[in-house]
Image: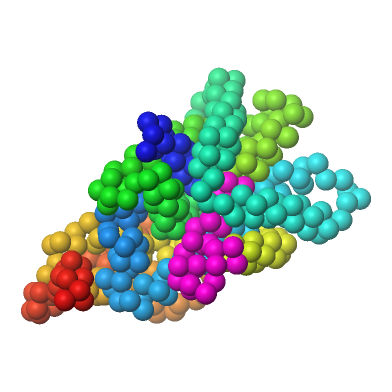
Amino acid sequence: MKKFDSLFIGLMLFSMFFGAGNLIFPPFLGALSGTSHWLAMAGFILTAVGLPFAVLLAISLAKGGVDTIASRVHPLFSKVFMVVIYLSIGPFLAIPRNAGVAFEMGVMPFAKDSWNSTLVLFLYTAVFFLLVYAVSLNPAKMEKFMGRWITPVLLLSVVALCTSGLLNLDTAKLAPSAGYESGAFFKGFLEGYNTMDALAALAFGIVILTAIQKKGVHDEKQLSRHTLKAALVAGSLLALVYVSLGLLGGNMASHGIYENGTAILSSASTLLFGKAGTAFIGFIFTLACFTTVVGLTAACGQYFSNLMPKASYKTVVIAVTLIGFTLSNLGLNQILKVSVPFLVTAYPLTIVLMTLCFFNRCFKSPRKVYGSAMLFTGIFAAMGGLSASGINLGVLQNVRMILPFSSAGMEWVIPALAGTAIGMLLSNGGKQEPSRAEELNAKAS
């Protein structure tokens, strides 16, 4: 590894994380939280930056990566969980969401009434995904293309927007809106789910490790060290950008009523830079969404080509881009309807799984602990997801609401702790499970 390689890989990681949700949600949180901004932002950063960092740390420390961690529950769980995660953050949810946002921000503001929006969307996404395919096809060059070229341009653009907004839109913070009047920290904590970065970190881990290995690093300790350096670079930049976007949103709150963060950024850019601001914010969104889609496509390509040896990396990349292209043409609103219920279900499972990973050495029988904890967490996480999708749970809804933290949308915490405790009790009554090293030695002999 050369002196600045970790920095450039960290910049590449930042560009892969920094997509549509990372732009949209911080300014909206800033506008709604008002005088409770810092509490809400602290919660947001915990899940939008801290949790992805923890995921990357866990992956770098576990031999075999995330598959090894998930296999501690059960090998079948590992396969199903990871396939669902990759498909969701890849072609079936995050990829079309980012392409849709790029279109909405980069093209629609300039569309004329006479244009056929369906045809324009088709043509735009066709070009968008052809470029994604071209860049994703060679993961060895992604670090150079994204880390050294696109990311600096993206960062400078976001800095220019936020700096101008903070200097020229200096207004007093408004009172917190509903939901942020009390429990602003927990509200921000849940809003951090929407970035999908903790789930993306499960996928990006393999991309980062591959990029580091391409630099000639193969020792496990060195891999972990360079992964952490890259994660620190990406995490620091993400936190800085989130705070800046949140403050910009807070300053814009007195200038109007906004439906979402997209409207806030569009209005701010136009207010600050006039008509050129519309093109400027569209440029920022397009770059951010493009780099994230490239990262997700490469991650899916590497994972599924390893999972199915008969499917080459190129074949998987073609399939991912074609599915993403097709679903992108359904429209952004349809895609967003699916995202919230899924995230409410997937995030608790990811949080508990990664937390257990750090205490793995403390468990006499890890599989019992992991299995019990994930079972209890999964039941209540699934209930939360069904409720978020509008399904009436009847009596089960009452059970959810009597649990601690239910008002903050975190009723799964106590079941997760209970499941862990039960697993540890069962573990103490059983035999010591062999370590990974012991299993490998047994196979070798």
Quarter location, residue 433: bottom left
Residue 63 placement (x, y as % from top left): 27, 60
Residue 362 placement (x, y as % from top left): 13, 62
Please give left or right for residue 406 compared with residue 154 in the image.
left
Residue 202 seen in the figure: yes
The residue located at (45%, 67%) in the rendering is 306
Name the chief secondary structure element in magenta.
helix
Of residues 429 and 215, the one nearer the viewer is: 215
Residue 205 highlighted magenta (yes or no): no
Q: Which residue in the rendered view is the most extreme toward the top?
A: 167
**Colour mapping used in the image:** rainbow
Please give left or right for residue 74 compared with residue 173 in the image.
left
Quarter location, residue 423: bottom left
Q: Is residue 273 above or below residue 35?
A: above
Q: Is residue 422 above or below residue 186?
A: below
Residue 4 placement (x, y as % from top left): 41, 32
The residue located at (30%, 76%) in the rendering is 74
Give the residues drawn in magenta, as a range. 289-315
Q: Which residue in the rendered view is the most extreme toward the right?
A: 114
The residue located at (57%, 52%) in the rendering is 138
Residue 425 seen in the figure: no
Of residues 228 and 348, the one nearer the viewer is: 228
Q: In this view, does 40 lie above or below 321?
A: above
Residue 291 highlighted magenta (yes or no): yes
Q: If the image is split into quadrants, where does the C terminus sit? A: bottom left
- The total number of labels drawn is 0
Quarter location, residue 334: bottom right
Residue 267 placement (x, y as % from top left): 67, 35
Q: Is residue 395 above or below residue 416?
A: below
Of residues 37 and 76, the one nearer the viewer is: 76
Q: If the image is split into quadrants, where does the N terminus sit? A: top left
